[in-house]
Image (cartoon, grey):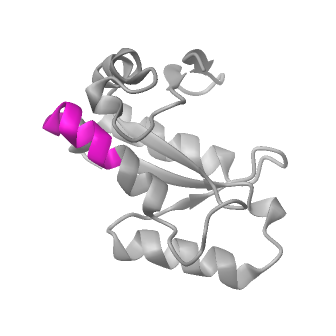
Amino acid sequence: MTPHLGVVDSDQDRPFVVADIPGLIKNAHLGAGLGHRFLKHVERTNLLVHLVDVSLVDSDHPLDSFNTINQELRQFKPALADKFQVVVLNKIDLVADPEQLNRVKAAFKQAGFSPRLISAKTGTGIKELTAVIRRHLFERDV
């Protein structure tokens, strides 16, 4: 339950720092859990990457957790929810039913996002995801 920092680096591109900020729960904006401490970390970011474990998402209500987090961000400071956001559907290698993945993808697309599909285990989609993040951080016209 502590934020972790890491550096994404390669020989060809500029490195950037990522922060894994777990533990945002309902009423975090009121200080529930580690709310204010974690939300202050979010204030210093240039963009938000929502990492969604697609193997655990309720495909009938795929946006519930995502919407809760964004609501907490907005209630803490409205500008936080207005930051550029990347939705990442992780653990695609664990989804046995392709229709489940399609329903989750469609729900995020309907909400205005282009979800990135990755598998941290197999490496699928990681290069594409880092390219999207780099373009936003360093080109600013994406």
Indicate yes or no whether the magenta region holds residue 75.
Answer: yes
Name the one closer to the observer, 115 or 63: 63
Magenta residues span 70-79
The quarter of the picture where residue 47 lies is top left
Looking at the picture, does residue 99 appear above or below residue 31?
Answer: below
The answer to whether residue 36 is above or below residue 53 is above
Q: Residue drawn 35% across and 31% down?
A: 28
Compare residues 55 and 87 and report the one nearer the observer: 55
User: Where residue 19 sits: x, y (%)?
Assistant: 51, 22
What percent of the width, then of the height, locates residue 117? 63, 60
- 3 left or right, relative to 32: right
Q: State left or right for residue 67 relative to residue 13.
A: left
Residue at x 33%, y 23% (from the top left corner): 31
Residue at 74% across, 62% down? 92
Inspect this view and state whether residue 83 appears: no
Rendered-image quadrant of the N terminus: top right
